[in-house]
Image (spheres, grey):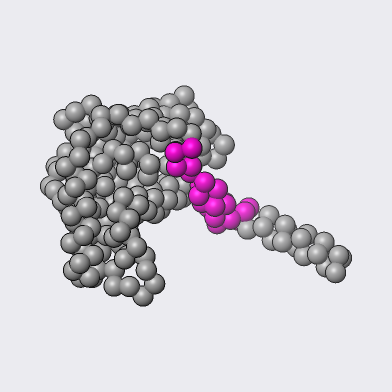
Amino acid sequence: MKITGTAVIKAPQAAVWAALNDMEVLARVVPGCESLNDLGDNHYEGVVKIGIAGIKGSYSGKIRLEDIDAPKHYKLIAAGKGSNGVVDAVGTVDLDTLPDGTTQLNYGGEAQIGGMLASVGQRLIEGAARQLIGQAVKALEAQILQRMPAESTVVDAPGADTTSPAAVDALNAAAARSAAEPVRKSVVLSESEQLKPETLVSGMVNEWLSTATGKIVAVVVLFVLGFVVGRLL
């Protein structure tokens, strides 16, 4: 399975890079993440709880970063396993500053899936993966702005120039302050702090509706609902 895509984040590149290397941020933007630990030398391990098409479970995994070229590129190699399957993946993250001062995040990766999880089907897994990535990117931008309250007000203000030199300098300064803070070696999130992978529901529905069976059932459901509403009016 291969996944590639891009996203634009309304923050300067330095701030995005700092967030992508902050365990406090990463633990809160990975859907279903329960814990994340820094093992040192760019090696990490964590636990994620997630479900795809009714197959739910916790997966423990390890990630290492390679080819690090701050503040614009790194490669990650991941391996995870749980009671319902195993996943081995290789991916890359690249950042580019756009002319308006925002940051374009380019990601790509390839994964091999085994066990019961593989029985779900590649198309469904790809749909779920894209939903999870989209949710994570939105959460990443929110975390960046949340950690820079004064700057986020400038960015989010209606009609405001989100990339003025003052705003960019302020965000870069905040990112530098964050990078200078002591690094935590372990982050364990309470139930209320974990990012719930709720968008998987719509992803599953959209993927299912793209199949012939899904379209037929959708038409039948809509017809029945229309008939019932018509009888009530």
Comparing 147 with 108, the one in front is: 147
The residue depicted at 25 percent of the width and 29 percent of the height is 185
Quarter of the C terminus within the rendering: bottom right
The residue depicted at 48 percent of the width and 37 percent of the height is 192
Note whether residue 164 is visible. Answer: yes
> Which quadrant of the figure has residue 88?
top left
| Total tally of numbered discs in the picture | 0
Q: Which residues are magenta?
A: 192-214
> Which quadrant of the figure has residue 46?
top left
Residue that protrudes farthest toward the top in the picture: 83
Q: Is residue 44 above or below residue 22?
A: above
Note whether residue 101 is visible. Answer: no
Q: Position of residue 141 (x, y in %)?
A: 34, 54
Q: Is residue 215 above or below residue 68?
A: below
Q: Is residue 35 left or right of residue 192?
A: left
Q: Is residue 209 magenta?
A: yes
Quarter of the N terminus within the rendering: top left
Q: Position of residue 67 (x, y in %)?
A: 14, 42
The residue depicted at 29 percent of the width and 60 percent of the height is 151
Q: Is residue 78 above or below residue 93?
A: above
The residue depicted at 41 percent of the width and 33 percent of the height is 189
Q: Position of residue 228 (x, y in %)?
A: 82, 61
Comparing 118 with 157, the one in front is: 157
Q: Is residue 58 magenta?
A: no
Q: Position of residue 174 (x, y in %)?
A: 22, 52
Residue that protrudes farthest toward the front in the picture: 150
Comparing 23 with 49, the one in front is: 23
